[in-house]
Structure formats: structure tokens, C-alpha cells
Image (tube, rainbow, N blue to C red):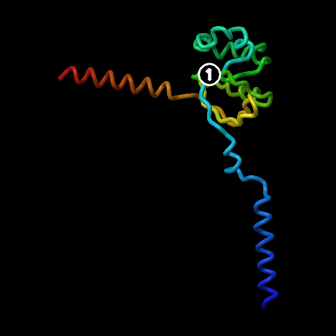
Amino acid sequence: MKKMFVLSLLLLGFTLVSAENMPKTAKQADKNVMEFKGIVIDNMCATSNKDKLGDFVKTHTKECALMANCQASGYSLYTADGQLIGFDKESNPKIVKFLKNKNSKLQVVLKAKKDGDMLHLVSIKNETTMKNDMKKSEMKKDNMKMGDMK
């Protein structure tokens, strides 16, 4: 009986030690993934327009970003606070695939792992906050008009 108890304790101890040394689970790995919002821009256009990049990204088109030379230069994310963060080489084909989608936009929300000063893309989707903000402001205007009618 004592032998069984001792063996059970040893087995439990080995199990606990093994569990601590196991690879990270998906949830644990997600702690390294961060969310970013911004505008995707190709590096060629970003470099060519670095002096007025904030203004340029407002007029830059998806068609330009998909031109062969622009694709070859790779991509970066221009954030609302004026940062330009580059994507690693593995992320660029994923961005091209996303941009080739008919409904994709340059304004995006993405999840990425930051590796030094580069981003490693995990997921990307259209940024919709601007649309929702516009709808809210339109609703306020409509409500104001309705209130004015009283």
C-alpha cells in the first residue's frame, strides 16, 4: 500500500514537471499577438513620400499598392500616431492576397507579433470603425433634424 502511494506521488510529480516544460498552448502564444490599426502602404511609395506621408496615405490607392514594383518593395503599416511599421518578408504575400480581395481596403485592423521593429502578420481585416463613426454622426444629424421639426 505504501509502495502504491509513493509511486502515485512520483507519477504526479513527473506529470507536473512535464506539464511545465510543454510547449505553449495557443492561448499562451496569443499573449505575444497585438492588435494594430492603420493604413497599409507599400514601401516604395512610403519612401518616395516620406516628407508628407500623413497626407499621402489619405490619397494612396489600393491599385497602386498592388502594382508589381510596389508589391516587390514590401509593405508597412502607417498608424494614426504617425508610426510607420514594416512587415517581415513572410507577411508581405499575405498582404498581397488580402489586397487582391475585391472588398479589401487599405485601412485595416490586424493582429501581428512584433519582432524588433517589424511586424509578423497573424490576421488582417478591413477597418470598420470609420464607417460606424460616420453612421453615428449621420444618425445624430438626422435626430437633430427630427428635433428641429417639433
Image mark count = 1
Q: Amino acid at mark 1?
A: Ile
Q: Quadrant of the C terminus?
A: top left
Residue drawn at x 71%, y 27% as measured from the top left: 95
Residue 89 screen position, x and y as percent = 80, 27
Q: Is residue 103 visible?
A: no
Furthest toward the bottom, the residue is 1
Residue ID for mark 1:
39
Left or right of 43? Residue 140 is: left
Residue 19 screen position, x and y as percent = 76, 62
Residue drawn at x 68%, y 11% as measured from the top left: 50
Residue 88 screen position, x and y as percent = 77, 28
> Few, some or many C-alpha atoms within 10 Å of disc 1 (few <14, some 14-19, many ≥20)?
many
Residue drawn at x 72%, y 53% as measured from the top left: 25
Residue 111 screen position, x and y as percent = 65, 36
Q: Is residue 83 visible?
A: yes
Residue closest to the eye, 138 or 121: 121
Q: Secondary structure at mark 1?
A: strand
Residue closest to the eye, 137 or 114: 114
Quadrant in the picture for residue 71: top right
Residue drawn at x 62%, y 35% as measured from the top left: 35
Q: Quadrant of the N terminus?
A: bottom right
